[in-house]
Amino acid sequence: DAEITQSPRHKITETGRQVTLACHQTWNHNNMFWYRQDLGHGLRLIHYSYGVHDTNKGEVSDGYSVSRSNTEDLPLTLESAASSQTSVYFCASSETRTENTEAFFGQGTRLTVV
Amino acid sequence: DQQVKQNSPSLSVQEGRISILNCDYTNSMFDYFLWYKKYPAEGPTFLISISSIKDKNEDGRFTVFLNKSAKHLSLHIVPSQPGDSAVYFCAASAGNAGNMLTFGGGTRLMVKP
């Protein structure tokens, strides 16, 4: 069965360290997204990609970067981790359709910056 | 400025009764709306969607209503079951159903047995 997986599921890192969160999907979807979930804010878009070599900034992109070298993967990098980046991160993917489609989400990565 | 708002952070309903979750949006470019359900320590899972050309979509116990003039949508769950207890997120996209989603803050639904 096709799926979307995130790794690691939990990570603790120190302030200032570079951290990369992995996202891998086997749906063969063109579109991939990174969101963060914080209390009172729902899910906020960090970065997204509509195809290989395409990347775009979302609402809360400062301090984060992504790259899309193939269809399956969209790793999220925190260049220099800050305590404000402690959050739960969700990766998602979707196909390009006018309707009757949905984004499929991974299980999430809980990141703690100490 | 939040483009998608869920003004009720929580809702408590008795089992068997109707649950109504509400969502308002401000961006007129949104033309596709979705509801997601989320359990603790899991990713959001898709529940139901509606295109802006429709005003109602039904799937079993779940019905979504869209009022474009009021920029308002609602999710009805009938009858509510204890397993429906979760956080529900409203989301919207513009231009293409697979495009990036803008989410509301979520509503925690508790269905009491």
Image (cartoon, rainbow, N blue to C red):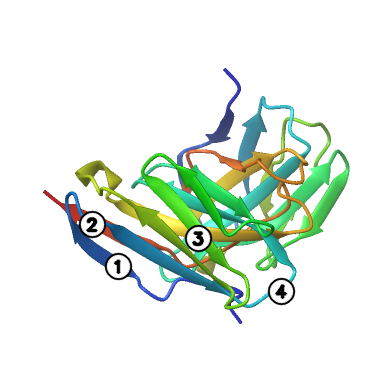
The CA distance from mark 3 to mark 1 is 20 Å
**Decide: marks 3, 4 in contact (CB < 8 A)?**
no
Q: Do the residues labelled 4 and 2 touch (CB within 8 Å)?
A: no
Q: Which amino acid does label 3 sit on?
A: Phe
Q: Which of marks 3 and 1 is nearer the N terminus?
A: 1
Quadrant assignment for the N terminus of chain A: top right
Foreground disc of the pair 4, 1: 4
Estimate the spatial distance between the alpha carbons at disc 2 and disc 1, rounded to whole Å.
Answer: 8 Å
Q: At 50% across and 53% down in the image, what residue appears?
A: B35
Judging from the image, mark 3 belongs to the subunit labelled B
Q: How many labels does the image show?
A: 4
**Which residue is the site of mark 3?**
B65
Sequence-wise, the earlier of marks 2 and 1 is: 1
Q: Are marks 4 and 1 on the same chain?
A: yes
Q: Residue B10 carries which label?
A: 1
What distance separates the C-alpha of mark 3 from that of mark 2?
21 Å
In this rendered view, identify the residue nearer to me: B43 or B14.
B14
Of callouts 4 and 1, the N-terminal one = 1
| Residue B10 place in picture, x, y as percent | 29, 67
Q: Which of marks 3 and 4 is nearer the N terminus?
A: 4
Q: Which of A42 and B16 is in front in this view?
A: B16
Q: Which element is circle 4 on?
A: loop
Check residue B28 in the rendering and tell me which mark sits there, or answer none: 4
Of marks 3 and 4, the one in the foreground: 3
| Residue B71, position as x, y percentages in the image | 59, 74
